[in-house]
């Protein structure tokens, strides 16, 4: 039943080719030629993200086509979802914890393996940008809770209420039973993880979420944990996750996928193995969702998930497409 709902709500395949002027302006043709010669199926620059976040990949592509860095592309790309109050799993508008507080998790990683994260941060609309500041302005990798929030204000971020009327009303309804049951459908699983390669061939990644709806106060999932919700190694590629974070943390999912690519697996094969490792630890219960996406240094991409319905968006000179992911459970 839950799975059927998931399918019903999942995005359908949409594909729109980019315009000729955009193609022409995209990048130094020499670089494209070299890439194609090396690897006919790979392409770069490229941005990919979990789910069908068309506006987020369009923003990332705008940065990449102007010659911007992969780091700027992923930050600005995911900020689109953080700002979208209709996305109830990311940023402002996110569903609150069981006490009615919206707490956000985010991390970012650059081509040099630098990383920054904020965990359980409140009242700041763009946790990804605070995470970037942690990476660039502090000697630390992670800041949590009040400390992260105060650091954000020091860095000039504004205090803002993240709980929208819609999320508040839903939470009040939930409180009548107070049953914590992560539901497998797109409304509860639209965390954005994004990976990009820029014109120099450098890779960065970002991941941002409000986490599982009605979680315990203080709960942190995989999304801000470097290696779990996101991992990038500029020599190999990157991976990022969506779904039940506790399960991704148990296998350090994104790091695993990057390491599998280092050992020669394609992004697709590595994502499949990543999901299968999680399933191996859940022999009795597959009634939850995990979706991984991955990209290697050549710009080849892949994805895999447990339940059908997961898709990922990609934007490169080959087009702007939403690709349905293959799944362990077929229907
Ligand atoms: C978490 N992985 O906090 C996140 C939730 C998620 O789409 O991906 N939702 O566990």
Image (cartoon, rainbow, N blue to C red):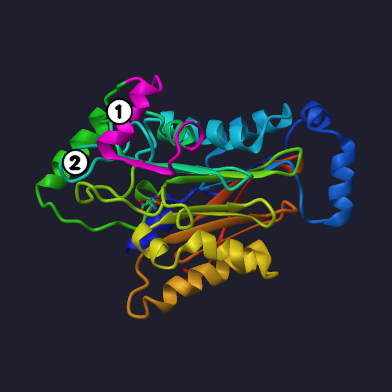
Kindly identify which residue carries mark 1: 150
Q: Nearer the viewer, residue 33 or 119?
A: 119
In the image, taking residue 147 as reference, residue 169 lies left or right, namely left
Kindly identify which residue carries mark 2: 171
Q: Is residue 320 visible?
A: no
If you read the primary sequence from the N terminus, does the residue marked by circle 2 or circle 1 appear first?
Answer: 1
Q: Position of residue 306 (x, y in %)?
A: 46, 66
- The image's mark for residue 260 is none
Marks 2 and 1: which is nearer the front? 1
Q: Is residue 138 magenta?
A: yes
Q: Nearer the viewer, residue 100 or 204?
A: 204
Q: Residues within 10 Å of mark 2 (few under 14, many from 20)?
A: many
In the image, taking residue 260 as reference, residue 116 lies left or right, namely left
Q: Nearer the viewer, residue 133 or 274?
A: 133
Q: Are marks 2 and 1 in contact (CB under 8 Å)?
A: no
The quarter in which the N terminus is drawn is bottom left
In the image, taking residue 63 as reference, residue 116 lies left or right, namely left
């Amino acid at each position: 039943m839950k799975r059927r709902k998931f399918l019903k709500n999942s995005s359908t395949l949409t594909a729109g080719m980019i315009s000729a002027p955009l193609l022409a302006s995209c990048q130094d043709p020499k670089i494209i030629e070299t890439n194609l010669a090396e690897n006919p199926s790979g392409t770069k620059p490229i941005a990919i993200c979990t789910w069908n976040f068309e506006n987020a990949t369009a923003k990332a592509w705008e940065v990449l086509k102007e010659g911007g860095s992969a780091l700027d592309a992923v930050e600005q790309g995911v900020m689109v979802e953080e700002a979208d109050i209709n996305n109830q799993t990311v940023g402002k508008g996110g569903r609150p914890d069981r006490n009615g507080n919206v707490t956000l998790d985010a991390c970012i990683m650059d081509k040099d393996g630098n990383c920054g994260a904020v965990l359980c941060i409140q009242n700041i609309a763009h946790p990804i940008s605070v995470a970037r500041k942690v990476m660039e302005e502090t000697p630390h990798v992670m800041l949590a809770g009040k400390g992260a929030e105060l650091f954000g204000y020091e860095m000039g971020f504004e205090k803002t209420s993240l709980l929208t009327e819609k999320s508040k009303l839903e939470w009040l309804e939930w409180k009548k039973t107070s049953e914590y049951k992560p539901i497998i459908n797109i409304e509860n699983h639209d965390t954005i993880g994004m990976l990009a390669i820029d014109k120099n061939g450098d890779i960065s990644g970002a991941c941002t979420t409000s986490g599982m709806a009605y979680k315990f106060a203080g709960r942190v999932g995989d999304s801000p944990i470097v290696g779990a919700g996101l991992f990038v190694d500029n020599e190999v590629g990157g991976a990022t996750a969506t779904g039940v974070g506790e399960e991704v943390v148990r296998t350090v999912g994104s790091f695993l996928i990057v390491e599998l690519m280092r050992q020669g697996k394609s992004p697709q094969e590595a994502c499949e193995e990543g999901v299968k490792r999680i399933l191996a630890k859940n022999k009795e219960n597959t009634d939850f969702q995990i979706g991984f996406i991955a990209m290697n240094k050549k710009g080849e991409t892949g994805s895999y998930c447990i339940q059908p319905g997961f898709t990922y968006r990609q934007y490169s000179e080959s087009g702007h497409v939403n690709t349905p992911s293959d799944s362990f459970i077929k229907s």
